[in-house]
Image: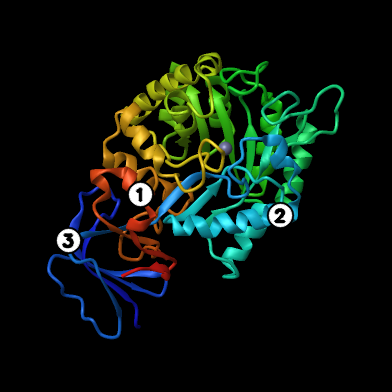
């Protein structure tokens, strides 16, 4: 079968092994042959893409915390005001843009409207629009007074992009509705957050009964959950109720660290420290020094760095990318956090890179076919001018991306 043959490339397979020179053949949507060393795979009728011995072939990036339906805005009220139709167009635009950026898979971490991720995922899968492989999330479910509840006593109906619920029955019903509408992931906001004055990051605002009610429905339907869990108690609830992808996990105590380690076969931590790191040290245009101190970004980053350094040591899988689509963290800079993991959490560049490749594939339950260059794996591939291991920030430079292939199709080919 005629395919695409990448020749004279540096193969960075993202198994954890260092790169090696060779050739890779793609037929249909799979990697069918890998050869190490001098050219050897017969050319036949294949389209040949030559890396000139200077380019790197690596798996497409997997974003573990995407918000395709948010238009680089920090204002949750404004995001809430955008109608569903426009929201869908926003998500469609960024879905294509993510492929342009080499992001070939996304685990959504909340949609701005209940059905937008579902519609986008379905249209991508049907080949109607361009975009990454996508796990569709619900909007985030929060409690009265939690992150995203923008109502006040005098404006009881004001809504943001969050869905505000109280009590196990309300969580059970909404979870059933959202699964009926087709979401893959129910997103819970279990802990507080920096931006909620009466419920800071180290507090746990959702009750165990509420988490349990959502979990019961999710597990009955064999769907999955993710959670905003900055506090140690929120992380413990995640483990207890089978929440596979835990976001943030800034303030871990010894018990939470032990629990994560004991469950590392199935659980993943997606720290999303980009926003915090940028706010703490590069956010002059957004926050005054007084605000940085008042909001505690540096303490939050230090807490996260301490926890992540420990999780890395204990072999808990960390996921990269995270929370891009806000003003401070615009879409397209998703690989920025890889450098933060090196800078603040003692990762080496290979370990950091695996958080957006190998571990991302495993977090999507596709670890045996996604996130690495191996024979039989899905052909989501990037050809990069240079060696990303020398500086992972290179992954944000779109003009270095010579080829973007998703599912065997060439989304971009500049060779
Ligand atoms: Zn988020």
**Mark 3 residue element:** strand
Residue at x 54%, y 28% (from the top left corner):
286
Residue at x 55%, y 14% (from the top left corner):
294
Residue occupied by mark 1: 395
Residue occupied by mark 2: 86
- Does the CB distance between marks 3 and 2 fall below 8 Å? no
How many other residues sit within 10 Å of disc 3, few (<14), some (14-19) or many (≥20)? Answer: many
Distance from disc 3 to disc 2, alpha carbons, whole Å, reads: 46 Å
Q: Which mark is residue 21?
A: 3
x and y percent of residue 103 in the render? 45, 54
Give the image quarter of residue 186.
Answer: top right
Give the image quarter of residue 206.
Answer: top right
Please, is residue 284 above or below residue 90 in the view? above
Q: Earlier in the sequence, mark 1 or mark 3?
A: 3
Specify whether 21 is left or right of 137.
left
How many other residues sit within 10 Å of disc 2, few (<14), some (14-19) or many (≥20)? Answer: few
Please, is residue 361 above or below residue 169 in the view? below
Front-lying residue, 290 or 152: 290
Please, is residue 268 above or below residue 369 in the view? above
């Amino acid at each position: 079968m005629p395919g695409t043959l990448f020749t004279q490339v540096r193969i960075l397979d993202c198994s954890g092994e260092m790169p090696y020179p060779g050739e890779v053949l793609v037929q249909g949507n799979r990697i069918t042959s890998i050869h190490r060393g001098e050219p050897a795979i017969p050319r036949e009728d294949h389209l040949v893409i030559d890396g000139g011995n200077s380019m790197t072939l690596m798996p497409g990036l997997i974003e573990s915390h995407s918000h395709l339906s948010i238009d680089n805005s920090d204002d949750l009220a404004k995001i809430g005001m955008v109608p569903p139709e426009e929201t869908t167009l926003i998500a469609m635009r960024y879905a294509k843009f993510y492929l342009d950026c080499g992001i070939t898979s996304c685990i959504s971490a909340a949609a701005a409207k209940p059905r937008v991720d579902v519609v986008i995922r379905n249209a991508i899968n049907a080949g109607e629009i361009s975009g990454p492989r996508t796990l569709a999330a619900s909007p985030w479910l929060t409690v009265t007074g939690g992150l995203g509840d923008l109502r006040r006593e005098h404006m009881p109906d004001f809504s943001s992009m969050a869905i505000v619920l109280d009590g196990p029955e309300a969580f059970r019903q909404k979870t059933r509705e959202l699964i009926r509408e087709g979401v893959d992931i129910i997103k819970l906001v279990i802990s507080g957050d920096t931006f909620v004055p009466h419920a800071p990051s180290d507090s746990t605002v959702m009750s165990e009964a509420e988490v349990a009610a959502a979990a019961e429905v999710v597990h009955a339907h064999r769907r999955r959950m993710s959670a905003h869990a900055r506090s140690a108690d929120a992380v413990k609830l995640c483990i207890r109720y089978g929440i596979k992808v835990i976001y943030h996990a800034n303030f871990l105590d010894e018990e939470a660290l032990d629990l994560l380690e004991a469950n590392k076969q199935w659980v993943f931590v997606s720290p999303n420290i980009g926003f915090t790191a940028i706010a703490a040290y590069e956010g002059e245009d957004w926050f005054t020094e007084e605000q940085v101190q008042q909001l505690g970004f540096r303490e939050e980053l230090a807490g996260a760095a301490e926890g992540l350094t420990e999780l890395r040591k204990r072999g808990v899988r960390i996921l990269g990318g995270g929370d891009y689509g806000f003003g401070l963290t615009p879409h397209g800079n998703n690989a920025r956090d890889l450098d933060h993991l090196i800078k603040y959490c003692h990762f080496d560049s290979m370990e950091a890179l695996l958080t957006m490749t190998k571990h991302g594939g495993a977090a999507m339950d596709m670890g045996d076919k996604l996130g690495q260059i191996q024979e039989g794996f899905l052909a989501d591939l990037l050809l990069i001018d240079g060696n990303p291991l020398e500086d992972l920030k290179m992954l944000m430079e779109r003009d270095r991306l010579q080829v973007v292939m998703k599912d065997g199709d060439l989304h971009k080919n500049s060779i």
